[in-house]
Amino acid sequence: MKKHTLKIESEKVLRYCEGKSTLDERIEIEKEARHSVDLRRAIHDLQISLALSKDIKELESIDTNAAFARMKKRIRKQRIQRINLQLMRYAALLFIPLLITSLVLSYLHFGASSHEMQYAEVNTSSGAIIRYELPDKSVVWLNSGSKLRYPITFKEGKREVELSGEGYFEVTADKNNPFFVKTPIGLSVYVYGTRFNINAYDDENCVETVLEQGKVNVIVPGKRQEIKLIPGEGAVYDKSTHCISKSAMDIYEKTAWKDGKLIFRNTPLKDVLKRLSRHFNVDIEFNNFSGEEYKYRATFSRENLNQILDYLSKSAAIKWKSEGPVQQQDDTFTKERITVTLY
């Protein structure tokens, strides 16, 4: 790691890769990583090492002692002078599968070539945001509750990933190997090298693509129709009507989430609450007894949920109450539940 990357303490980088860092630490690390190739490489290598370590620990949990004891009992029946030699042979038989499996895991994790395509999957826990580097050095930020599936080694001529949730992509330019992002409903985005955001949550009515830099083609599912975007434009695909529309959009509003910010521009209250629910990993129930529709223009970065709700209540008759997590029969806990009422 080069000199200027030493500004980030190794403990902070480790917590970041384990998904345990605070919002301030995450912002600090990602800001530094934008300017440091070595830091990005170190984060990528550490993420791979942590994943490999987890797999090996699972393998080591196999109860080899019990199997060894059974073999030893059989060996005792043989001649005394052969005991040591036989024990060595059986021990080798026990540990060779573990060694081979460990080598296979290393082979897969570090991108060795294979005739059969191997895939990796990155998941973001609810209420978290992560930054991840793909095999081609492209970078993706994944929003809360998102999933990205990609081949460990991209095939020549095509780079293709699958996204469920929301992701902001910085794709490295390569005209000979275009980059595709596929969504669960079949809509895909085709690029060469660019910066763009895709919102493709399952519980949303639309799939939204916005372009910050470069060029993007949005391919409509089931049709031979492509929507070309230029910087500052976005495309919205309606899942129910199967129609797609293009318009100018506020790119910063759509992409600031990767920096830990919530930006609302003339946003209806119900949509504000939906984004707060995902951002803070809580269940929010909205009851509108007034029949009025309130829209908000605001930017939040370090405020907690109560502070934001208090701000919203200053322009509308909003009351809210919260219920803590409840333990269920399977010993798991429900999310915190907040009921927001507009009178």
Image (spheres, rainbow, N blue to C red):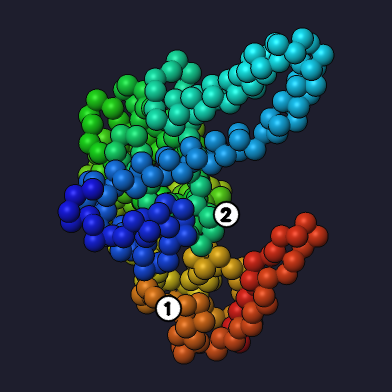
Residue position for label 1? 303
Residue shown at the point (30%, 64%) measured from the top left: 28
In the displayed structure image, the side of residue 203 where residue 13 appears, left or right: left
Residue 26 in view (yes/no)? yes
Q: Which mark is residue 171?
A: none
| Residue at (33, 63) in percent of width and height | 27
Question: SS for tag 2?
Answer: loop
Q: Nearer the viewer, residue 59 or 254?
A: 59
Picture coordinates of residue 222 (x, y %)?
Answer: 49, 32
Q: Amino acid at mark 2?
A: Asp
From the viewer's side, name the closer residue of 44 and 50. 50
Question: For this view, does 174 lie left or right of residue 160?
Answer: left
Q: Is residue 96 above or below residue 238?
A: above
**Left or right, 198 with reference to 212:** right
- Name the residue beneath numbered marker 2: 203
Q: Residue drawn 25% across and 43% down?
A: 194
Residue 65 placed where, x, y %?
A: 71, 31
The CA distance from mark 1 to mark 2 is 26 Å
User: Within 10 angstroms of label 2, few (less than 14), some, or many (20 or more) residues?
Assistant: few
- Relative to the observer, which residue lies in front, 226 or 207? 207
